[in-house]
Image: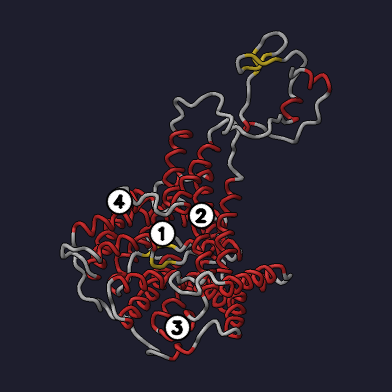
Amino acid sequence: MNKLSEATSVASRPEDENLGIGANLAYGLQHVLTMYGGIVAVPLILGQAAGLSPSEIGLLIAASLFAGGLATLLQTLGLPFFGCQLPLVQGVSFAGVATMIAILGSNNGEGGIQSVLGAVMAASLIGLLITPIFSRVTKFFPPLVTGVVITTIGLTLMPVAARWAMGGNSQSPDFGSMTNIGLAAMTLGIVLLLSKIGSSTISRLSILLAMVLGTLIAMALGLTDFSKVAEGPIVAMPSLLHFGMPTFHVAAILSMCIVILVTLVETSADILAVGEIIGTKVDSKRLGNGLRADMLSSVLAPLFGSFTQSAFAQNVGLVAVTGVKSRYVVATGGLILVTLGLLPVMGRVVAAVPTSVLGGAGIVLFGTVAASGIRTLAKVDYRNNMNLIIVSTSLGFGMIPIAAPSFYEHFPAWFETIFHSGISSAAIMAILLNLVFNQFTAGNPDQPSVISAGHERSLRYTDIAALNDGDYFQNGKLYDAEGNEVPLADDDDHHGSPAPRPTRSQADAVH
């Protein structure tokens, strides 16, 4: 009987719905288009910093697509002890870009692309060993914390959408031109228009359709070029250790360990966030499986010439905005990524989508993530506690790297690496403040500050209706007319239907 009920419970998970091959391909491609710019940006930046040739940079990009696809399949479909089986797209993490560039530029003979790949492998292996610690932190992620993190994810990604809308390349003379921003605005308008159309299928595919239509408009205006699609090989199998054997240096590994800690925090937040969005249970076991998949993928990715793998926050937004919760959709996206890694010609087609088109769609995607976080924060009880202080301080702390990107540039490198990410900054602050104010309650005031309790004062009719003539409050306790103390019940102890509106005498008894 227990096995039957367990099987029924597993089958009823929203992420286990299979929409069919056609829908999986369409929605999976939408996921790939959403994160394609991000997954190719890191190898492009690092390849240029390492002084690699264009063909070698192309190999880095292909390797990142291939490794990201395999990591996505592992995360969504899962193996024993690996994979959270949630709709999360994996790809190269932005968290380590600055650290890896620093390793590349090392002047002590420990630099180079081989040192970067070795540091990623070693630090990821250390991360794999410490995942049991991170998998047991779910009790420290109540809606108060997850709401802050989800909101911060959305707000942190808005500058990315803005740069995409402006053209993506800040060195280009057209960056920020009315043409680029106008194309982004048209794409945004198409998303909103298609979202309003009655057909649920069209509404769910609004992001993908808007990207296609936006690209067609760009072609008509001569703003995109598909001529380079035919250049280069059609099929290219990724080769192992193409850049040579990774080298391992203590300083590089230690600096990458900080990146891995940040990646673990951000991936934990993404796993919990997507679980909250789709309405499924994420316990410590499931979180641990997801983190182990993340770290295992990061250990193996350098063998193909790629880097640390983590969940893409923008795709969490896509899950929220489309309402498509199936992990098989994202797994299909992983297959598409693997195919793009094997077929560079398909990657060149996707790369021809103008960045400003991605920016128009990104405004909706990333804004939806923030809105999902606000919806979660709406569930938090702010009465007679310090929760408002926790939310406001954590959100403010997370916004510092966005408002002032150079805020931490004079801090130690390890500190800057951790707190330069608004997501990890907000997550760390929310966790710590939740512990200080809600777990270790010693020293908390009986009456919180005006800021924390800043809401309209009100009493429920059910509470007033229970009062009798002559009842009075004294020193926080309720007494009847004869001076006997009346016990106060917790909110959880109230059951039954609402009481009728109080009579005049009952209302007067409050005074």
Depth check, mark 3 against mark 1: the one in front is 3
Q: Secondary structure at mark 1?
A: helix
Depth check, mark 2 against mark 4: the one in front is 4
What amino acid is labelled 4 in the image? Trp
Crowd class of label 2 (few under 14; some 14 to 19; many from 20; radius 10 Å): many
Q: Is residue 80 left or right of residue 302?
A: right
| Contact, mark 2 vs mark 4 (Cβ under 8 Å) | no
- Tell me the distance, in whole angstroms, between the alpha carbons under discs 1 and 4: 25 Å
What amino acid is labelled 2 in the image? Ala
Q: Is residue 59 left or right of residue 112?
A: right
Crowd class of label 4 (few under 14; some 14 to 19; many from 20; radius 10 Å): some
Of marks 3 and 2, which one's residue comes earlier in the chain? 2
Q: Where is mark 1, residue-wise?
A: 290
Residue beneath the point at 71% across and 72% down: 199
Q: Where is mark 3, residue-wise?
A: 348
Q: Is residue 305 above or below residue 494?
A: below
Of marks 1 and 2, which one's residue comes earlier in the chain? 2
